[in-house]
Amino acid sequence: MYKVENRVGKLVEIRVWSPVSAGEAVAWARDHDAAVSAIGGPYVCLVDLFDAKVFPQDAVDAYTAVMQTEPHLKRTGTLLSHSPTSALQVRRMLRETDNPVRRAFTEVRPLLDWLDPVLTQLERARLREVLAEHGRV
């Protein structure tokens, strides 16, 4: 299951939680691309995977394919699950994209420190709001 939104500025909010399937990853890619296209330029992503378990390999392949083709991505902060296996899988996915603007975090404070410098005041407020909505802060 997933949600992709762009409520404020250039901040794209992505939340993925289990169960996750490859078919859903295809729909996610479509929704992600629509949100990014609507921004029309550089964008920043919050990816909340806190409630996601290990992804099936076909879903990993689908998500990774999208992550490799994001020319306007300015920065991504991914909040990982507490599951060590899930965290390892996501970190591997990020390594495969070979993009230094993507970072994964197990705690909110370092994630905020990573994203805040490239966000406006309104975007920073929305970032905290969306994290609070799901009990992350």
Image (spheres, rainbow, N blue to C red):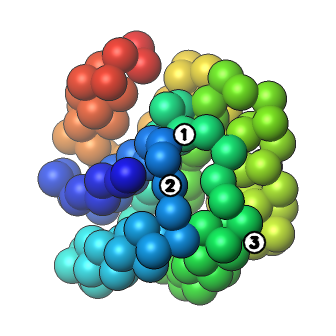
Q: What percent of the width, then of the height, locates residue 109? A: 56, 20
The structure residue drawn at horizontal position 18% and vertical position 52%, both measured from the top left corner, is: 8
Q: What percent of the width, then of the height, locates residue 94? A: 74, 59
Q: Residues within 10 Å of mark 1 (few under 14, many from 20)?
A: many
The structure residue drawn at horizontal position 32% and vertical position 24%, both measured from the top left corner, is: 134
Type of residue at label 1?
Answer: Ala
Type of residue at label 3?
Answer: Thr
Q: Is residue 47 visible?
A: yes
Q: Which residue is mark 2?
A: 20
Is residue 128 shown above or below 7? above
Q: What percent of the width, then of the height, locates residue 118? A: 46, 50
The front one of 58 and 7 is 58
The front one of 4 and 127 is 4
Q: Which residue is mark 1?
A: 52
Is residue 16 shown above or below 59? above
The disc, 1 or 3, on the residue closer to the chain's N-terminal end is 1
Name the image quarter holding residue 37: bottom left
Decide if residue 100 is on the left or right side of residue 116: right
The disc, 3 or 2, on the residue closer to the chain's N-terminal end is 2
Q: What percent of the width, then of the height, locates residue 93? A: 75, 61
Measure the C-alpha gap from mark 3 to mark 2: 20 Å
Q: Which mark is residue 97?
A: 3
The disc, 1 or 2, on the residue closer to the chain's N-terminal end is 2
Is the C terminus in the top left, top right, bottom left or bottom right quadrant?
top left
Q: Please, what secondary structure does the residue beneath circle 1 have?
A: loop
Is residue 39 shown above or below 92? below
Type of residue at label 2?
Answer: Val
